[in-house]
Amino acid sequence: MNEASPFDLQALGAAAAGPRAILRVLHVLGHLSDHPEGCTLAQLCDALRLPKTTLFTMLRTLQAAGHLHAAAGVWRLGPEAIALGARMAASARHAFPACAMEALEGLCRRTGETGILAVLTADGMNCRYVAVVESESWLRFSVERESTRPSYATGTGHAMLAWLAPGELRAILARVRFDRITDKTVASKRALAAALAKVRADRVSTTDSGTVAGVLSVAAPIFDASGRVMAAISAGGPAARMTPQLATIQRAVRGAAEDVSRTLGLVGDWPAVPAQVAGP
């Protein structure tokens, strides 16, 4: 069966005329947020599959309320829509990590391993674990909520460092003092640069024995509405158990990271376009 277009509202039925109208407004705003250069009426009709008269009336109403701006036949988001979007994004960000708990619990169920949400400390030197859902297995990776680990050595740290702006990353690396916590800990700027390049290529960080011998961490970055990396989500557990199903776990972690990013208001590509991120 063919999937319906996200803008095809016929499936809602005749009784849902009101909800259809509301969703059409949201689709107009959503489409224009994806096209900051603006769209003509004809382009919007094409993309949204709406009659020209119906759409034009909607656009003029939104324009009168300040949600849209029109110039030379091109429609763009107006100040009211932009301000509303910023307030909604701020609300979602303030709700973190509570807004990410469903995804974190789902990741734990799907992988059978401990799920973790982490953020960087203000100086970027450490990861702080803000939420933990432990595996139900008797043999599991355990970490205390609000505890910290060096960002250069951890999977969640790599997932966030890899997507920082180059200047931010250089400032952090200039202050890092590398200690070999285990035999496999990343312990030099060159080794970290290689690890971060692999994270950007794979869209996921896979770290074996970074701070605890025998523990594998699979982590992916979480972005806010502005596209800035703000956290990471990971699944961690015994390497011997995780390695045989590594590809499946990596997919689950990527999916969870994207889900949380969308909840926080991210639109467009997840993660950031690799070409826009430079290495250390």
Image (cartoon, rainbow, N blue to C red):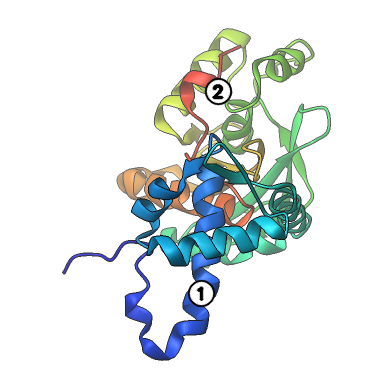
**Residue 106: x %, y % from top left:** 50, 65
Q: Residue at x 75, y 60 (%)?
A: 95
Q: Amino acid at mark 1?
A: Ala
Quarter of the image for the C terminus: give it: top right
Give the left or right position of residue 269, taking residue 245 as reference: right
Q: Quadrant of residue 2?
A: bottom left
**Residue 26: x %, y % from top left:** 55, 63
Q: Secondary structure at mark 1?
A: helix
- The residue carrying mark 1 is 21
Q: Residue at x 59, y 30 (%)?
A: 158
Identify the disc placed on residue 97.
none
- The residue carrying mark 2 is 183
**Residue 150: x %, y % from top left:** 72, 30
Q: Amino acid at mark 2?
A: Asp
**Residue 67: x %, y % from top left:** 68, 55
Using the image, determine if residue 160 lies above or below residue 173: below
Q: Secondary structure at mark 2?
A: loop
What's the distance in space between the residues labelled 1 and 2, CA to CA?
A: 60 Å
